Amino acid sequence: MPAFNFSIGNMINIILIASGIGICGMIILQVNSGTQLRKEVTRYFRLFFSIVILYIGSHLVRMLLEGQPGPVVHYALYGVTLLEFLASGAMAFLFSGLTLFIAAPEKDQNRRYTMLFIGTLALHTVLMIVSQFISLCYYFDADNIYHRGPGYLFSNLAHVIMLGGDVVLLIRYRNKFSDRIRPAFWNYIIAPLAAILIQAFFRDVQFIILATVAAAVYMSMVIMRDQMLKYEKQQAVTNRLSMELNMATAIQASQLPRLFPAFPNRPEFDVYASMKPAKEVGGDFYDFFLVDNDHIGLVMADVSGKGVPAALFMMVARVLIKAHLQNGESPAVALENVNNQLCESNEAELFVTVWTGVLEISTGKGVAANAGHEHPAIRRANGEYALQVYRHSPAVATMDGIPFREHSFQLNPGDSLFVYTDGVAEATNANNELFGNDRMLDALNVHPDAQPEEVLSNVMKGIDAFVAGAEQFDDITMLCLKYNGPAPSGEQA
């Protein structure tokens, strides 16, 4: 059996190919561990460098087998040579696809280039397969020595067409390529062409493989660096937005009464409220305040939408509602005036559902208005909580000039009132099931005679047990007032 030709040229080629395979393998490992890279970039370079390894690896096998006798070697040589040529076409196709992706031409142009590149790859594949049988591009003689066929130039036709398309894209859409990326793409196009010219004078050394690997590695490093810089900028923006949202959440929470007991010198009633914000800043809010010495105003509301706009809208709505109620307006009149004011400049087309009421402390008589909000629950002394269902008015800020309906209610000593936002009933578990009003009432009635703080705690425990850690996308806001009755003469502050 003839021994392998250990010429200087072959040894250099083996070193170049082995180094190329090692470098490509390292790039694949680096890409796989690149947490800052987009998934598309990771998948692309993993595939690209796998094909590069297939290309230069099949060339190495061909080089080692060439000249060895036997029919098995003969067929093996044809097989690895086919893999080598198909891999080179796939490399050109993937590079063209990357160029087209970054260039991002108009839809029609994109379709034309895509069809050109796919058609060229298909033609290249057919030519290489046909060459296996008719020796068009290459063949092996009886001694298993490689020779170029009469149609060898056809083996480079696909590369020329696709590189031509790449050049047009790079020139026509040069503004789409950043100053960092553009030279790397030109280098990938020019380096193999320069290697071919050098190869004409040094035929024994495969400079084309060296140029291909070096240009591919350089291009990948530039693109990955570009992606990392974009990731860092994006992270900086994300961190800034996160800080702003956290600040908005803090500002939002600071607008709500949070000191309890809220009225320690008023034995006639006890009130407690809470808001558990969701992951994103929302527009839920509650409020309670003395309208005068004998009336307390209560508000529970939910602004449509999320984020900073909803939080800002919430703060404006809260201030307006409180101002109108403290001005002595009834709940219906207050909501009508607030509605008209919010509709004056509501380009974001937000709206707010509101339950608001004013309770006369000395008698327990109340007046409430419900603008598209959840039905409140009332518990009578020694009884259980039950929903108070009635017709709603439209939400506030949906339409200018609309009237709002109000109704009277009565709280007797020992009665309690519970109001909330839809985040309570719509709390969702991992099976996408809602907590619902029935479970809410069950939680309220675990200890119906409890003080307001414990009542809200029981509901929150019921929600937490139900959702079992599932992420919530809406605020959970609740308020409970327990009416103890008028204070004995001389005790009222």
Image (cartoon, grey):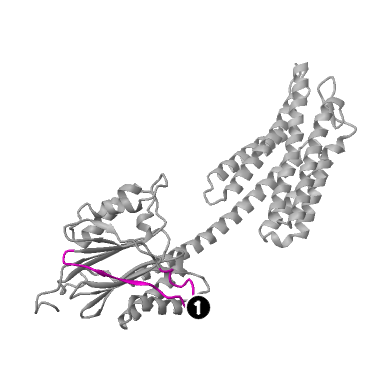
* Magenta part of the chain: 393-414
In the depicted structure, whether residue 177 falls above or below residue 351: above
Q: Residue visible at 28% across and 51% down?
A: 462
- Work out which quarter of the rendered image holds the C terminus and state it: bottom left
Residue 22 position by quadrant? top right
Query: Is residue 70 in view?
Result: no
Whether residue 185 appears in magenta in the rendering, the answer is no
Query: Is residue 397 in view?
Result: yes
Q: Position of residue 156 (x, y in %)?
A: 82, 40
- In this view of the protein, which residue sits in the foreground, 378 or 186? 378
Task: Give the left or right position of residue 429, taking residue 382 as reference.
Answer: right
Q: Position of residue 274 (x, y in %)?
A: 29, 63
- Amino acid under label 1? Ser
Q: Is mark 1 on a helix, strand or loop?
A: loop
Q: Position of residue 391 (x, y in %)?
A: 38, 65
Crowd band around label 1 with a 10 angstrom C-alpha radius: few (<14), some (14–19), many (20+)? few
Q: Main secondary structure of the magenta part?
A: loop
In the depicted structure, whether residue 229 falls above or below residue 204: below
Task: Give the left or right position of residue 176, taking residue 351 as reference.
Answer: right
- In this view of the protein, which residue sits in the foreground, 84 or 437? 437
Q: Where is residue 398 in the image (x, y as percent from the top left)?
A: 48, 71
Residue 375 position by quadrant? bottom left
Q: How many marks?
A: 1
Q: Residue visible at 20% across and 71% down?
A: 364
Q: Name the residue under label 1.
A: 345
Residue 8 position by quadrant? top right
View extreme (bottom): residue: 327
Whether residue 396 appears in magenta in the rendering, the answer is yes
Q: Residue visible at 79% across and 53% down?
A: 167
- Work out which quarter of the rendered image holds the N terminus and state it: top right
